[in-house]
Amino acid sequence: MTSRNGRSHELVIRHARVLDPSTGLDAVKDVRISGGRVAEVGDDLHGTRELGADGLYLFPGFVDVHAHWRTPGREDEETIESGSASAAVGGFTGVVMMPNTDPVVDKPVVVSGLLRRIEQESRVRAYVSAALHVGLKGERLTEMRLLKEAGALCVSDDGLGTQSAGVLRNAMLYASSAGLPVLLHCEDHTLATGVVHDGTAAALAGIPGSPASAEDVATATALVLATETGAKSHITHISTGLSAALVRFFADHADVTSDTTPHHLTLTDDLISSLEGTYRVNPPLRPEDHRDAVTDALRDGTLDFVATDHAPHASEEKDLPLEQAAPGFLGHETAFAALHTELVLTGKLPLARLVEAMSCAPGRWVGEGGSLAVGSPADLTLVDPSEEWTVDRGSLSSRSWNSPYLGRRLTGRVVGTIVGGELVLDRTGAKFGVRA
Ligand SMILES: [Zn+2]
């Protein structure tokens, strides 16, 4: 990361409403940052630089364990620079990059090359997921011990999933012995033959659908194998009621965590009636009953956290009829605002649970951040809970524009992102200035 060297200047954020579920703190406080860490949380603190944050929330920085920064290979869609800028705009201080790039991140030299570029280009902390199988083909295992030595955080066949239970079982055993968690994209390709969720909306639109079982069968397989092998596993982008219920059932048996996405929590498959490629995503948008079941599961802690599956695509891959479009949505920049607008302000999810799900729990998973306890890395997110804004192309920092929220009015906006004590996003100029 540019110029983050642990010798950051002291900074005091004053009068913010500090909400940190990891410590139970919810009060107007001052926070003093020194040497890149949280040095003190208290009242009437002062320092060489002060930011007045009256009316703003201060949270532990958001952490996103699922993002596609399209590097290497598709830098026209996203780069580490633009992906991390997009993350910072969304309040994310840490991001895990998925391995389905070109080349695939299946060799130690690709991992170390990415980590070097992250060091130079990323505005936020970024971690690398390596592939579980060479070329994501579900055949030959990657050299996971060497990938870990090179700096990989976890392994995944994201984008495709692992199709054979026997192959997945071996992969889990090997990942476990290499000390790497497995991040699982659960999708059975013998069932996932359509492009949207197989339901009423698909029938009305005349578009082939995939049944929810395409996800559920693979989720059940992954949970059974995680239980048997003891492998530390994380199931990503859960989008159905049954998959959430399966996670609940297996919670006491397996070393498993899980996430769902902002879009599966806030959008439904009625959007496909527009026939626009914009709304194609994998797993697909589901009907209301699934969305509500997934929301309940996030609220009660069955699903541990939110991850965006930030998936930029060039317009020539998205400005197409649904059946021809590439699946995926941008996620970083709208995640908090969409969830705040649709779930917190409507009373479906307490704000503290949202912060736990966007900061604390994923921070624990990556092993860094997610807490404002004294001594923690000074990774923080400042939010104006009342700012209303409209998502439009001009407002996006990503290199791509494929947000399903384009044109939507949202309430609540990230106005400051601090990584290791440094402001990497500052939209607060109008609200407060840095006093040198
Ligand atoms: Zn995936």
Image (cartoon, grey):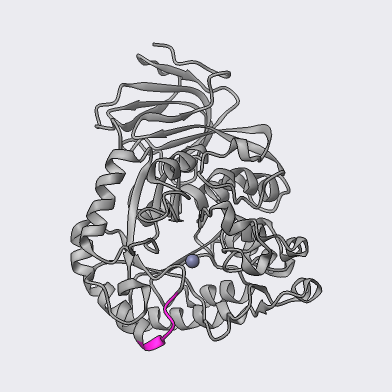
Which x, y percent locates residue 248? 53, 73
Residue 102 appears left or right of 207: left
Span highlighted in magenta in the image:
161-166
In the current view of this chain or complex, which residue is farthest to the top? 436
Is residue 184 one of those drawn in magenta?
no
* Secondary structure character of the magenta stretch overall: loop
State whether residue 92 appears in this view: no
Out of 341 and 317, give the one closest to the viewer: 317
Q: Residue at x 58, y 75 (%)?
A: 245
Which x, y percent locates residue 381? 48, 36
Q: Residue at x 55, y 68 (%)?
A: 238
Where, by quadrant of the figure, is residue 105 drawn? bottom left
In the current view of this chain or complex, which residue is farthest to the bottom? 166
Which x, y percent locates residue 102? 36, 61
State whether residue 12 appears in this view: yes
- The image quadrant where one finds the C terminus is top left
Residue 17 appears left or right of 266: left
Residue 262 appears left or right of 142: right
Q: Is residue 273 above or below residue 75?
A: below
Residue 178 appears left or right of 68: left
Q: Is residue 432 above or below residue 419?
A: above
Q: Is residue 404 above or below residue 154?
A: above
Which x, y percent locates residue 353? 56, 50
Q: Residue at x 30, y 31 (%)?
A: 36
